[in-house]
Image (cartoon, rainbow, N blue to C red):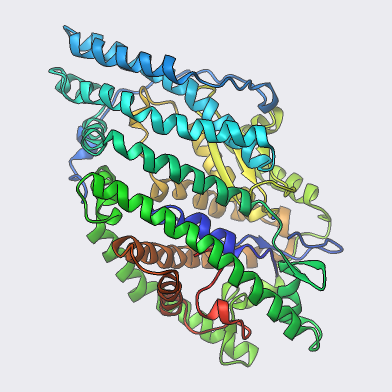
Amino acid sequence: MKFSLRIAALLLSILLLLSACAFRLPRIPKLPFFSDHSSSSGSSSSDVEDNAQPEPSDEFQRSDLSFEEMVYVRPDYDEIAAQYESFAQRVRKAGDAQTVIDVWLEETKLTSEYSDMNTLAMLRFNLNTADEKLTEEYQYMQDFLVRLQTPGNEFIKALVESPFYPQLAERFGARTMEALKISAEHYDPEQEQFEILENELVTQYLQWNSQEKTAAYHGEDYALTDLYYILMGGEEVDKPIAASMIDSYYREQNQTYGELYRSLVQLRTETAKLLGYDNYLDYHYAISKQQGYGQQEVENFRSWVREYLVPVRNELREQAMERNGTDQLTFLESYSLLPENEKIYYDPSIQSTDDVIDATMRLMRELSVPTGELVDYLEQYHLLDLKAANNKSDGAFTTFFYGYQEPFVFSSYEDAGTYIHELGHALNYFRSKPTEVAEQNLRGADIMEIHSQSLELLASPKLSILYGDTAPYMVRSNIADMLQDIINACVIDEFQHEIYANPDMSLEEYNAVYARLNKEYMGEVDYLASLPLMRGWTGSI
């Protein structure tokens, strides 16, 4: 099985967030004559009943706008800040609950409008991170949202301090109101300065991540992917040169972007201390109480993964070593543990990325009426971009225009598994009725990943459209990859817990923590004599 090597980019994209989010390497089966591409303490269980809310109308209108027809208009900060001040005053002066509800619904309409502008700016920037104008608008919107927190928080305080709080909880849900209280209690206008700087760091990372990963040798640039292929199966005389180039690449990237990450940790620590917390870890769990679980529950989950799932992976790893006749797997082999992985091919009729996309859309149409309706809509209104491109951000995600009521699927990973995964997110957005107010959208990554991975499993009966006679192998591979996702997420989550609890560690200590955790969860790995990789210098931390 061929893999696109995006390990470094994937790791840092997750390390930039505190929440644990499962990730996977794109699984690219062999294509005949097709070349590779280098692209919290929680609330009680009674909250479920307390958060009951009226069903939205059976009918809701999508804008039916194509992506090209969406017009970006930069929101005016002063104008919108003034509207929030007016919303807060009107709530405080309201003489009845219905007046407060009407103001909140009015605010939600405003939110959906500037939210759509933010989503549009974000997507256009990710499609071309080298464009100065798109970068400027993306940065403006990120900073706009940070600055809007101060007037927005006054509106939130007016809602939670309203004498009509019980009526608001009945209408919009007790959990929604509790989340607003937590938000109001954990904001200080002074944190704006730290969050603005954080935005700049994230933009720097996204721009770096969209660049082609290359290493230089005698004045020539070589793709990192090609260097790995040389290490894995190239001529013996070329392997030392490839290893040296990879070493140099990771040393440079680790220093540059490791320090960027350390700066991010320091900024977040300053925010936490501003609000009275010793570190960002404590602050994170304090503002995440509405999730229904806290730090102890997360640590319990990781202990269960170590006790029950890691041994399963270890058994698969030992079987793979026995098959290969080695006492260690290379780091790429460690992501492909099943014997049938090497037998997975796309159907012979699939010869290009366009063929992969077409076959995936055919699968979705044959799978069910709802999935067919989804891809018909996405294709009709050009709400997906699925090919790798120069200066396009590396990765895959699905987002949603809340005002337009339209999802958008983004991917620079050109493989069907990624497409189906993201279409699972899109299906959830497409089939879900809109909430009355934006604050009711309390779903986290833990819930959202259910939608994407479920569709991967539900697609099993139709995988022969993509993989022909090798489809049964892909079904089992999907399940094994989900096991791997959970373990990967625990590595990243535990790493971040240690880093944010001890923010003054050096970059070398960061690297050592990551190397230790990776070994504990993944076992011994043959890094092909690459010292940076052995020491955790993945170019991402």
Q: Residue at x 31, y 69 (%)?
A: 304
Q: Is residue 466 left or right of residue 448?
A: right
Q: Residue at x 56, y 88 (%)?
A: 328
Taking depth in this image into account, of 173 and 541 the one nearest to the observer is 541
Q: Residue at x 62, y 54 (%)?
A: 209
**Location of residue 146 by image quarter:** top left
Quick check: 320 above or below 110? Answer: below
Taking depth in this image into account, of 72 and 67 the one nearest to the observer is 72
Q: Is residue 328 left or right of residue 18?
A: right
**Location of residue 124 by image quarter:** top right
The answer to whether residue 21 shows anywhere in this view is: yes
Q: Is residue 101 left or right of residue 332?
A: left
Quick check: 476 above or below 318? Answer: above
The answer to whether residue 383 shows anywhere in this view is: no
Residue 126, percent across and down? Answer: 62, 41
**Location of residue 182 by image quarter:** top left
Q: Which residue of the protein is positioned furthest toward the left in this rendering? A: 163
Residue 230, percent across and down? Answer: 76, 78
Q: Quadrant of the N terminus?
A: bottom right
Q: Residue at x 79, y 88 (%)?
A: 236
Q: Which residue of the protein is positioned furthest toward the right in this rendering? A: 33
Q: Which residue of the protein is positioned furthest toward the top in this rendering? A: 95
Residue 371, percent across and down? Answer: 60, 38
Query: How many numbered circles are shown?
Result: 0
Quick check: 387 above or below 8? Answer: above
Residue 5, percent across and down? Answer: 66, 65
Taking depth in this image into account, of 298 and 51 the one nearest to the observer is 298
Quick check: 158 above or below 307? Answer: above
